[in-house]
Image (tube, helix red, strand yellow):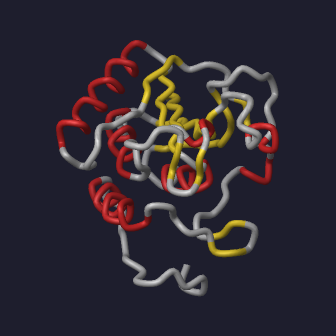
Amino acid sequence: METAVFAGGCFWGMEDLIRRIPGVHKTRVGYTGGHVDNPTYRLVCTKTTGHAEAVEIEFDPSVVSYRKLLEFFFQIHDPTTIDRQGNDIGDSYRSEIFYTSDAQKEMAVKTIEDVNASGLWPAPVVTKASPAVTFWEAEPEHQERYYGTRGGKLYTIQNASAVAMNVITAAESLGLATCWVSSFDEDLL
């Protein structure tokens, strides 16, 4: 097993999409890249800790490669905005890859270059590649949240139109079935 750590906005939606990929053994959400020990959700939301909301991914590289995880990551969030995903603003919502080895660093840098060259996004990628530091697990109520709900209410995707087709394309490339829901009706989710 290997570990990957990605930050790309709200960790709830990212975790739910990533954990469904064949070869992903386990995910957990938390905080990393900051300067405060034992951060909490409330503290990170003050925008004073330097932490990013992130997903730690344990995966089997014989089933899904690190490169495939990176490609999926770049399709499920907007990597072109600094410290922001839609209406979520602040450094905790930044786009950053926390690599755990030199091989992951090389692949992260190469993938950023490839995404920039691909034209997938209309602006340059601002995603950083940084060495992994302590990953602080988020509180239990933040773990394995199901995408589509937030506190019992519908959780809408920021940048939905920009992300929806990328998610479908990425899921299909991994052999996952997809369907398009034309309206976000909570009864259908």
Of residue 84 and residue 77, the one placed in the foreground of this image is 84
Q: Where residue 136 appears, x then y in whole percent?
A: 72, 30
Residue drawn at x 54%, y 35% as measured from the top left: 58
Judge left or right: residue 98 versus residue 122.
right
Residue drawn at x 32%, y 34% as measured from the top left: 67
Residue drawn at x 41%, y 33% as measured from the top left: 127
Residue 152 vertical position relative to residue 99 in the rendered view, above or below: below
Q: Where residue 94 appears, x then y in whole percent?
A: 53, 38
Extreme top residue here? 102
Quarter of the C terminus within the rendering = bottom right
Judge left or right: residue 21 versus residue 47.
left
Q: Where residue 180 appears, x then y in whole percent?
A: 37, 77
Quarter location, residue 181: bottom left
Residue 102 vertical position relative to residue 70 in the rendered view, above or below: above
Of residue 47 and residue 130, the one placed in the foreground of this image is 47
Residue 134 vertical position relative to residue 62 in the rendered view, above or below: above
